Image: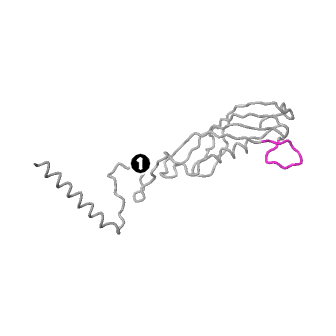
Amino acid sequence: MLPVRDIVRKPGEMREHSFTVALAEQWGEGIVSYEAGSKLDVDVRLESVHEGILVSGTVDAEYAGVCGRCLTDIARPVEVEFQELFAYPGEEETDFEVQDDHVDLETLVRDATVLSLPFQPVCQPDCPGLDPNTGERLTVSAGAEQAAPIDPRWSALQQITDQGRAAERGATENTEES
């Protein structure tokens, strides 16, 4: 909660605040989230307008979880922008209102940061994921590269290709001996 008593009903007045908040509980339910105890750096501007208090700001945080493809642990910084009008109490029902000369930013900041979490997070943009046969991470696999299984309908063509390679090797060996 931030006090706004000094700018309530004074259009044109503005205040800026910067603070850090430690989360008491986890925010987010997917494979990545903001863990309990993590820090959110909040920069906020409060502007008095005729209808209420316009709140604009940014949140710098770090989400943690696992890669959606290879299941390795990841943690990435994120910067989220938000803006909302906290209306003065009146006849109209609004989502956010100025309450007792304060604005409560928790719901606004929580919604903005949780909605910024990636739906399918990856450890790197071209993460190949896990090998479907062995379950090993494909980025770590240092073994011989395995050929993709060949569709039986195309196996006759593979035989032709193998014969062509054998013929090329034979021709190369004959030219080296000459």
Residue 131 lies, with reference to residue 25, above or below; the image says below
Give the image location of residue 166, x and y in percent: 21, 58
**Disc 1, SS:** loop
Q: Quadrant of the N terminus?
A: top right
**What residue would you read off at disc 1?**
139
Given residues 161 and 107, the one toward you in this image is 161
Residue 158 lies, with reference to residue 63, above or below; the image says below
Which residue shows up at 20% across the image and 58% down it?
167
Q: Is residue 114 left or right of residue 97?
A: left
Task: Write down the quadrant of residue 104 in the picture.
Answer: top right
Which residue shows up at 11% across the image and 49% down it?
177
Amino acid carrying mark 1 in the image: Thr
In the displayed orientation, state which residue is furthest to the left.
178
Give the image location of residue 70, x and y in percent: 47, 51
Give the image location of residue 149, x and y in percent: 36, 62
Q: Is residue 46 left or right of residue 72?
A: right
Q: Which colour assignment does the render follow?
A: one colour
- How packed mark 1 is, by other alpha carbons closer than 10 Å (few <14, some 14-19, many 20 or more), is few
Q: Is residue 157 left or right of residue 83?
A: left
Magenta-tinted stretch: 85-97
Given residues 163 and 86, the one toward you in this image is 163
Q: Main secondary structure of the magenta part?
A: loop
Number of labelled discs? 1
Task: Write down the quadrant of residue 25 in the picture.
Answer: top right
Which residue shows up at 74% across the image and 30% down it?
16
